[in-house]
Amino acid sequence: MNIFDFDVKNAAGETVSMSDYKGKVVLVVNTATGCGFTPQYEGLQKLYDKYKEQGFVVLDFPCNQFANQAPGTEEEIHSFCQLKYNTTFPLFAKVDVNGENEEPLFQYLKSQQKGIMGSKIKWNFTKFLVDKDGKVVERFAPTTAPEKIEESIKKLI
């Protein structure tokens, strides 16, 4: 099993197979527009711009589970990210990353790379780095700035 075995919903509510990202280095991030870490969108976009031609992609999954920091609709979140941070990487439907209704993809990601709270996600902007074969290779804390992940990305490209 790997991340390519999962289907998720994009921001328009359409089903997307994670197998669409086979052969790419993927950074899966649970995000929020009203979080102290929201400026990380800028760094995520810089990484995406720098490495997308080499097979790197950032996948943005908004999450409103932490202090209601992603309260808008997917359309509002998308507009905010594009206007404020010029994001162009894929945006997915809002998800739960912990608990009873958690997105199965995140359940899998957490089972492969535990964090400081075990398998639970502590806060927004937790990042999972996945290799070209769909294996989860690293997990980064919300406090880890995107530029600190660059060396790990370069090793996988």
Image (spheres, helix red, strand yellow):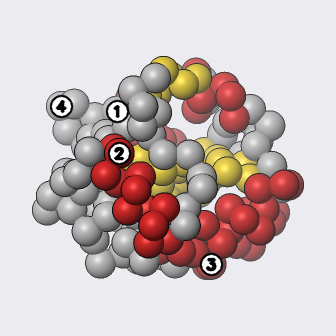
Could you give the CA–CA distance between mark 3 and mark 2, rounded to whole angstroms? Answer: 27 Å
Nearer the observer: mark 4 or 3; the answer is 3
The secondary element bearing badge 2 is classed as: helix
Given the current orientation, which residue lies at the most extreme left position? Answer: 67
Q: Which residue is mark 3?
A: 147
Residue type beneath disc 4: Glu
Residue at image mark 2: 75
Residue at disc 3, secondary structure: helix
Indicate the position of residue 85 as horizontal and vertical percent values.
50, 71
Front residue (pair 128, 84):
84
Q: Which residue is mark 1?
A: 103
- Marks 1/2: CA distance? 20 Å
Name the side, left or right, on which 79 lies relative to 50: left
Closer to the chain start, of discs 1 and 2, is 2
Q: Which residue lies at the image location 60% right of the left edge and 29% below the top edge?
A: 18
Do the numbered discs 4 and 2 sit on residues whose CB atoms are within 8 Å?
A: no
Q: Residue at x 32, y 60 (%)?
A: 32
Label 4, on which residue? Answer: 100
Q: Earlier in the sequence, mark 3 or mark 1?
A: 1
Give the mark nearest the N terminus, 4 or 2. Answer: 2
Residue at 14 percent across and 62 percent down: it is 67
Q: Quadrant of the N terminus?
A: top right
Q: Position of residue 33 (x, y in %)?
A: 31, 64
Residue 74 lies in quadrant: top left
Decide which of tag 3 and tag 2 comes sooner along the chain.
2
Q: Is residue 11 visible?
A: yes
